[in-house]
Image: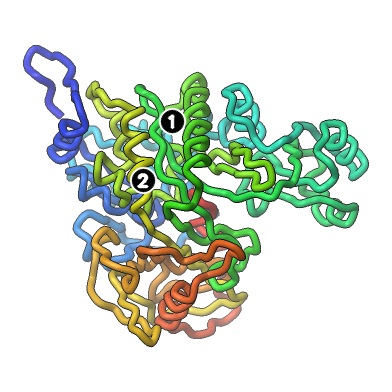
Amino acid sequence: MSQPAGGARRRLRNIPEIRTFFRTNETPIVFVGPTAFNLLGLDRWARNFSYVAYYDSWEGAHPRVFSPRHDQYVEFQSAEEINNYLLRHPDVQQYIARRGSSPKVAMVFFDEETEEICEELGYELILPRHRLRQHLDSKITTTRLGNEAGAPSVPNVLGTADSYDELVSLATGHDLGTDLVIQTPYGDSGKTTFFIKSVKDWEKHSADIVGEDLKVMKRINNKAAAVEAVLTRHGTIVGPFMTDLTGYPELTPYPGGWCGNDLFPDALSDAHRARGVELVRRLGSRLTQEGYKGFFEVDVLVDLDTDEVYLGELNPRISGASSITNVTAGAYADLPLFLFHVLEYMDVDYDIDVDEINERWQELAAVDVWSQLIMKEPTDRVERIEAAPRTGQWHMHDDGSLTFRRAALDWHQLQDETECFYLRVYGPGDYRFKGADLGILVTKGRLQTDEPKELTERARRFIHGIRSQYISAPVGEEIHPPPVSYLTSSAF
């Protein structure tokens, strides 16, 4: 963006001027990832915003999504490896060069190699440093920082335990009882959270616990909600709260695996939402002292027996919930949350009233009801996909059947609960295997009931309708599909 005459740094004085800034933006902004999903639709708001994706969900039809040629099979071990592969691909480098000079690059997962590649190529990675993110990603670190900020976790003690007796002694010495939740520092919560209330439970999980730093928590009767936020120079902007969908066997083979979200007004009560916003903002202020800025996601837990609200896990990155955060009434009243992140990395000064934005977004939360399903292959088989559902808008008929309605670039134009947007990840020629990422479905309305938590009938019809569009054939044992799933955790 050109500077005003005389070299003075440009200043944006309010939200309308910030909107205009993005709609006339001249700086290339590129989101890189296995898919374009996380920030899909932001190109509606920001000129020169584009996507580089390994999987071309639109078969070349999306004007701002670029996927390079894959001349040979590459077996990736992580999303970081995919992103580094993309950044080093000659086709990608040519595509970014055509966008203009000094591009700004964003992604969900990256490592120190990513930072080296971007520095080598002259790309600005508009994210906190990997070393800082790794430090903050520890559940132990999050707990300590939250305590310092006045945003406490569920009653807990930090320590180690090499036996069940040591664990019980540690817990009872801090009045936590013997019905416990144990977390190790790193990893998806579904795989590094353990419920221990007997020697049998300990023996089942001890190999993953012994030798690790532990967060030992009292087990509470809780209601959980997730929220995304952006730490800006003016304070922390907090998005809408939503509930997670986890462990549904129709969607994931992993019992504790995250498989979607419901965003709706009653995800938290007004009082709990206000307290949750307060805790997230306190944590944001503490993260500033660590040198962090920009986007992060936090889980909040409500103790249904005591009515206390606690800080849960911190994910210091773009998350998988951004898809529906960015289509809320708050986003349309001001800006999608991630663009406040981008502002922190643009060569401008700006003024916003964070208190006013947070208050407005809490009021507008009463009108938002969106949901998404993360659809993995739940069965233990390896088959080659011969046909797959198209990316775009699908319509559910009165009898529950699903038909393709039209091609679409994203889900922003969905009108009602009979429609959904499906983003295909694996298509013809790919292999479906246990845990394979088939695609993501976004729709208006809720897909999970309150208590007991179950998929709604509409959700089951969407799942059946999309899955019935996949046609695959068994393959020989010589086929070795990728050993990992690339959209894992709520931060895919």
Residue beneath disc 2: 87
Q: Position of residue 443 (x, y in %)?
A: 36, 65
- What residue is shown at x 93% (from left), y 42% (from top)? 165
What secondary structure is found at the residue carrying circle 1?
loop
Q: Do the residues labelled 2 and 1 touch (CB within 8 Å)?
A: no
Q: Which amino acid does label 1 sit on?
A: Pro
Q: Nearer the viewer, residue 151 or 347?
A: 151
Q: Nearer the viewer, residue 445 or 55?
A: 445
**Can residue 81 be seen?**
no
Q: Which amino acid does label 2 sit on?
A: Leu
Left or right: residue 424 versus residue 258 is left
Residue beneath disc 1: 128
Find the distance from the CA under tag 2 to the CA under tag 1. Answer: 18 Å
Q: Where is residue 332 in the image (x, y as percent from the top left)?
A: 25, 46
Q: Say few, some or many: other residues with alpha carbon within 10 Å of mark 2 (under 14 / 14 to 19 / 20 or more).
A: many
Left or right: residue 126 versus residue 413 is right
